[in-house]
């Protein structure tokens, strides 16, 4: 979290919390007030959340130390090594049924797997697996795929043509919007870096 962040974990409009952390918070202390965070939901309804916050750690600006990233790196390395062992154990895959029974698993099915789907039924968000499925032919067996939650072997039972988009203009707008926002943010950061601007807006925020 940086000093100009607006979001804290699940609270999307938490600028006062961030302002307290950077302006008054001290490591080990809890704020002397309960923060009310008012948010607007996607359906238009309003929601108020109440947060009791404490500052547990401060990190200096710059390249992270080994201790700061140790747990994150360790988790990724363990995930990678586990995947390697699983893939080696799987070996050559001949069919899903024998693979599942030989590893104490069961074959699961999922319908409507596409690039656009936010997740896979019975599995969750696995973009690498989704991409692999969309590149296979019907009944073609994939190689072991390392996903977020495990190692997967998939086999499409049926491949259909994607329906034509009903509104191309709306689709283009949806794709361009996040790119435009990214450009705006990138330009702002580039100007700050080039002109050596120090952004201290957080000091003017109330909490």
Image (cartoon, helix red, strand yellow):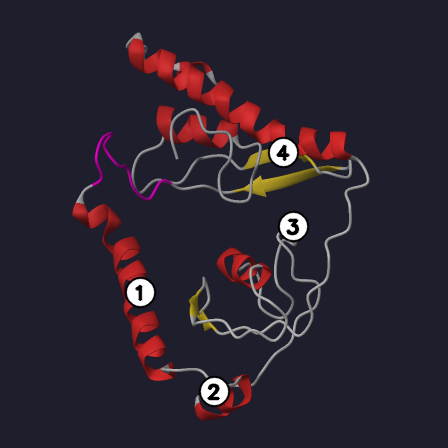
- The verdict on residue 58 being magenta is yes
Question: Which element type, helix, strand or loop, lies under badge 2?
Answer: helix
For marks 3 and 1, the one nearer the N-term is 1
Question: Which element type, helix, strand or loop, lies under badge 3?
Answer: loop
**Disc ID at residue 175:** 4
Relative depth, front residue between 9 and 126: 126
Question: Which element type, helix, strand or loop, lies under badge 4?
Answer: helix
What is the span of residues highlighted in magenta in the rendered image? 55-64
Question: Which element type, helix, strand or loop, lies under badge 1?
Answer: helix
Residue at the image position 28 percent from the left and 10 percent from the top: 196
Quickly name the residue at label 2: 99
Percent coordinates x, y for residue 182 in the rendering: 50, 26
Left/right placement of residue 56 relative to residue 155 reads: left
Q: CA distance from mark 3 to mark 1?
A: 27 Å
Mark 3 near mark 2, Cβ–Cβ under 8 Å? no
For marks 4 and 1, the one nearer the N-term is 1
Quickly name the residue at label 3: 116
Percent coordinates x, y for residue 101 in the rendering: 50, 92
Dominant SS of magenta comes to loop
Disc 1 packing (10 Å; few <14; some 14–19; many ≥20): few
Residue at the image position 67 percent from the left and 38 percent from the top: 48
Percent coordinates x, y for residue 30 in the rendering: 40, 40
Q: CA distance from mark 3 to mark 2?
A: 29 Å
Disc 4 packing (10 Å; few <14; some 14–19; many ≥20): few
Q: Which of label 1 and label 2 is nearer to you? A: 2
**Disc ID at residue 80:** 1
Q: CA distance from mark 4 to mark 3?
A: 12 Å
Residue at the image position 26 percent from the left and 60 percent from the top: 74
For marks 1 and 2, the one nearer the N-term is 1
């Amino acid at each position: 979290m940086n000093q100009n962040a607006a979001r804290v974990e699940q609270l999307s409009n938490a600028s006062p919390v961030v302002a307290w952390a950077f302006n008054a918070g001290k490591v080990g202390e809890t704020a002397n007030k309960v923060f009310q965070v008012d948010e607007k939901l996607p359906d238009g309804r309003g929601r108020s959340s109440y947060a009791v916050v404490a500052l547990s750690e401060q990190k200096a600006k710059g390249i992270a130390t080994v201790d700061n990233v140790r747990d994150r790196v360790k988790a990724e390395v363990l995930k990678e090594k586990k995947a390697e062992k699983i893939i080696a154990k799987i070996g050559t895959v001949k069919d899903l049924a024998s693979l599942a029974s030989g590893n104490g698993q069961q074959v699961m099915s999922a319908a409507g797997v596409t690039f656009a789907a936010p997740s896979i039924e019975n599995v969750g968000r696995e973009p690498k697996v989704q991409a692999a499925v969309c590149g296979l032919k019907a009944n073609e067996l994939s190689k072991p795929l390392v996903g977020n939650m495990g190692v997967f072997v998939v086999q499409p039972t049926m491949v259909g043509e994607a329906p034509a988009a009903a509104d191309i203009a709306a689709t283009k707008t949806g794709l361009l919007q996040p790119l435009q926002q990214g450009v705006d943010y990138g330009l702002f950061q580039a100007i700050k870096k080039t002109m050596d601007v120090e952004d201290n807006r957080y000091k003017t925020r109330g909490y």
